[in-house]
Amino acid sequence: MNSNSVKNITKKVLSKAWATLYEIDYDFQFKDGSWKRLSRESYDRGNGTCILLYNTQKSTVILTKQFRMPAYHNDEKDGMSIEVCAGAIDKNESAEATVIREAEEEVGYRIQNVKHIMEAYSSPGALTEKMYFFVGEYSQDMKVNSGGGVASENEEIEVLELPFSMALKMIETGEIKDTKTIILLQYAQIHSLMKSNG
């Protein structure tokens, strides 16, 4: 497929509340040469960043726990989700600057150095959001506040410091179901960022 396989694109806004939901109609050329008029919905909420904060000395990671309505709506008991620190990239702010700011707001650590490891779409069939993945080391002397999120944004975030081995086990037990969190924890395991405790 190439860019010439898509033409006559029209967009209609279906909703513009927290983010923008578009209905996009377009002509698409299939491999057999035939053209069909297709229609898809695309939810545009901008791009985001996420970071796994880890401590090599203690073999621990910092995660968050917060209520997620879509998970609750999809029959997830209490709707609580355990995740890495993450946030939407503001206009005129880099992914790196965003993730450093979010780490301080959500978990209370002022991180100096972060490493960008990849970019990925979590649900390209419905969301425009591209996530920028980072890892960064934390230590106790970087703690500047208790975290918990920004009250004006109606955030209520519980900060979790967990043994790395426990976080990995929580993927197996289903306690962690968030895709970005699973990716970053497995990245840490594959790249031996630290030894797991047992």
Image (cartoon, grey):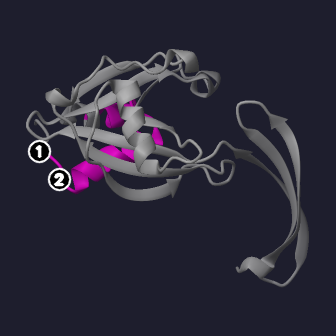
Residue 84 in view: no
Q: Which mark is residue 151?
A: none
What residue lies at 36% left-to-right and 33% top-to-bottom? 103
Residue 44: horizontal and vertical position, in percent? 70, 46
In the image, the segment drawn in magenta is 169-195
Check disc 2 and report the residue beneath it.
192
Residue 90: horizontal and vertical position, in percent? 56, 41
- Name which quarter of the figure residue 10 lies in: bottom right
On-image quarter of the C terminus: top left
159 vs 38: above or below: above
Q: Is residue 147 magenta?
A: no
Residue 136 in view: yes
What residue lies at 54% left-to-right and 49% top-to-bottom? 122
Crowd rating for badge 1 (residues with CA inside 10 Å; few <14, some 14–19, many 20+)? some
Left or right: 167, with 175 as reference point: left
11 vs 103: above or below: below
Q: Which mark is residue 195?
A: 1
Crowd rating for badge 2 (residues with CA inside 10 Å; few <14, some 14–19, many 20+)? few
* Element under disc 1: loop
Please identify the dominant SS of the magenta region.
helix
Name the amino acid type tagged 2.
Ser
Residue 138: horizontal and vertical position, in percent? 21, 36
Which residue reaches farthest bottom? 33
Alpha carbons under labels 2 and 1: distance apart: 7 Å
What residue lies at 26% left-to-right and 45% top-to-bottom? 136
Do the CB atoms of the residues marked 2 and 1 lie less than 8 Å apart?
yes
* Element under disc 2: loop
On-image quarter of the N terminus: bottom right
